[in-house]
Amino acid sequence: MADKTKDEILYDHNHDGIDRRGFLKCMAWAGTGTLCVMQGGVMKSFALNRPSDPGPAVAKGELSFVQISDSHMGFNKPANPDVAGTLQAAVDKINGLATPPEFLLHTGDVSHLSRAEQFDNVDQILKSTGKQTFFVPGEHDVLDDDGKQFRERYGKNSKGSGWYSFDQKGVHFVGLVNVMNLKAGGLASLGQEQLEWLEDDVKHLKSSTPIVVFAHIPLWTVYPEWGWGTEDSGQALGYLKKFGSVTVLNGHIHQIMQKVEGNVTFHTAASTAFPQPEPGKAPSPGPMAVPADQLRSYLGITNVNYLQGHQALAVVDSKLG
Amino acid sequence: MAGLAAPLALAAILLLAGAKSSTLRAPQAPAASAEVKIDNFSFGPAAITVAAGTTVTWANRDDIPHTVVSDDKVFKSKVLDTDEKFSYTFSQPGTYPYFCSVHPKMTGKVIVQ
């Protein structure tokens, strides 16, 4: 069984002059969810016994939303022959949250083969949350048409290959696309046009504005051998340096990973479809088959809470089963 | 006789040229073909050498979709799900590096001689 070690990190965030960098790796493989909370300037992580109830500290937040990722609608191989069923289980979990989310973020690989009926199926299943979902594409969503269909469905107000931003309750959200123009042998990239747009988009925001960036492929280098990284993300993060709270939400790797560096919290979500191996633990990053009765413990949703007065967002991962 | 030889020769040539090729040529060998198997996020073999005129067929045996895209935009497959195939006939000698546009760390090359 995976080990449930809790990492406690002391990171003095609110005091000027003490500027410690901390690394937090929360890899919750099985069992309960993980809550990482900034309280009074100290980052603590807790294992949760009841994932749907994040605890009194964050139960009433100013803004609450859910990240889901990698639904891969249309996948039907042994690793999960019923991705529609597990996406439904994720929706059931969302609908059962003590604090309902204001909206959902889907960090891509909505479909498995960019087919219309696959997108339709996801839309249908998500409808029962009654909430709006903001999407960014994964590489499985832009096959054969360079994302034209994806943008028509989910990117009506987007620019370029599908990037956009919006504001909710004082938090600024930025959806980025890093799955276009993938180069042979290379990592993902954002590209010059998108970077220039991002620089301009955040230029006039007050540094106290909490920022949430969401994109499919991780914006930090998780494992370059498997293409798990974005080569020009450093430039993007440079434009966000002035902000006191930046949360980066990604998908693509089908497992939870978290890193805190300065004012930036990086988080990757579990898939709602199938798990993938940990970096280097398998010859390739493909779908990982696990015993059927354990599958749902490898899949999950992420609940995010913004509490006024707290700089960082509280990120809570919970398993489907 | 010289006066007749040339037109006779010409007629003979024309006759031969007009004759159906199958009656005059040796039966042709089938066009050369080669296969590349896609599995476990890799092309196998990663590098192949073929004669000009060979048709290379990529078959996806992996449990995840892949594509076959030439670095230099010479050829490009649609997305290949498990058991789908893509073929391209290489008529010109040269080196053709390619990759999977969905998983760009997957690379291969075809050397055409």
Image (spheres, coloured by chain):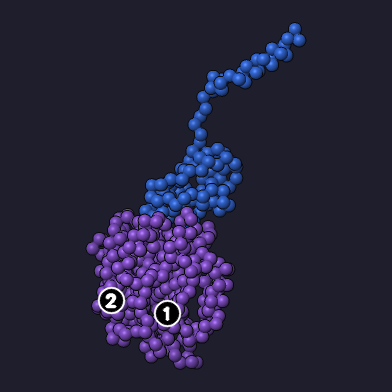
Chain colours: A purple, B blue
Q: How many marks?
A: 2
- Disc on the earlier residue, 2 or 1: 2
Q: Identify the residue position indicated by label 2 in the image.
A: A97
Q: Which residue: 46% across, 76% down?
A: A166
Instruction: Place residue A53 in its image quadrant.
Output: bottom left
Q: Chain of mark 1?
A: A
Residue B26 vs B12, above or below: the answer is below
For residue A208, side relative to residue B12 (left or right): left
Residue A72 vs B91, above or below: the answer is below
Q: Which residue: 50% across, 40% down?
A: B55
> Residue A118: horizontal and vertical position, in percent?
36, 57
Local secondary structure at mark 1? strand
Q: Which residue: 45% across, 92% down?
A: A15
> Residue A58: horizontal and vertical position, in percent?
32, 84
Amino acid tagged 1: Gln
Q: Which residue: 57% across, 40% down?
A: B91
| Of labels 2 and 1, the one closer to you | 1
Q: Residue furthest left?
A: A293
Front in this rendered view, residue A98 or B76:
A98
Say if residue A231 shows up in the picture: no
Front in this rendered view, residue A98 or A266:
A98
Front in this rendered view, residue A122 or A37:
A122
Residue A101 vs A155, above or below: the answer is below
Local secondary structure at mark 2? loop
Q: Identify the residue position indicated by label 1 in the image.
A: A168
Quadrant of the rendering where the C terminus of chain A is positioned: bottom left
> Residue A317: horizontal and vertical position, in percent?
33, 74
Amino acid tagged 2: Leu
Q: Chain of mark 2?
A: A
Instruction: Place residue A149 in its image quadrant.
Output: bottom left
Q: Residues within 10 Å of mark 2 (few under 14, many from 20)?
A: some
